């Protein structure tokens, strides 16, 4: 039988060290395509013309779709999801 006084005791003011945690891999989150129409208008359209231009000529959703398609054919950098988000935003905010 082991006598409790035979077990070495650590002084009360000495901290015990916990076992080191195993490293957890950190995965960087890559931002996806922006689907905020206002941000897309500012970030992608303002390179060539003022975002205020959309206020000057309200259009229907179909007209905005054709306008954005035309801008893409001229070099605007938008994927399909971004195009749809931009068209929806333009139609809702600057539609007729």
Image (tube, grey):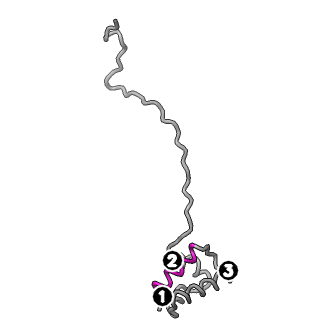
In percent of the image, x 51 and y 36: which residue is there?
A: 22
Is residue 62 a member of the stretch shown in magenta? no
In percent of the image, x 52 and y 72: which residue is there?
A: 35
Q: Position of residue 11 (x, y in %)?
A: 33, 21
Residue at which label 1 appears:
94
Is residue 82 a member of the stretch shown in magenta? yes
Residue 68 quadrant: bottom right
In percent of the image, x 49 and y 85: which residue is there?
A: 91
Q: Is 2 on the left or on the right of 25, as rendered?
A: left
Residue at which label 3 appears:
75
Label whose residue precedes the other's in the sequence (2 or 1): 2
Q: Position of residue 53 (x, y in %)?
A: 54, 89
Residue at which label 2 appears:
37
- What's the CA distance linking mark 3 and mark 2? 18 Å
In percent of the image, x 49 and y 78: which residue is there?
A: 38
- Give the extent of the magenta segment: 81-94
Label whose residue precedes the other's in the sequence (1 or 3): 3
């Amino acid at each position: 039988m082991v006598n409790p006084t035979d077990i070495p005791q650590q002084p009360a003011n000495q901290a015990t060290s916990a076992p080191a945690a195993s490293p957890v891999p950190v995965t960087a989150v890559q931002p996806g395509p922006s689907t905020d129409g206002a941000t897309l208008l500012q970030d992608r359209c303002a390179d060539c013309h003022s975002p205020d231009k959309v206020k000057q000529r309200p259009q229907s959703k179909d007209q905005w779709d054709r306008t954005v398609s035309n801008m893409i054919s001229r070099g605007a950098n938008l994927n399909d999801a971004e195009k749809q988000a931009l068209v929806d935003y333009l139609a809702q905010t600057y539609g007729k």
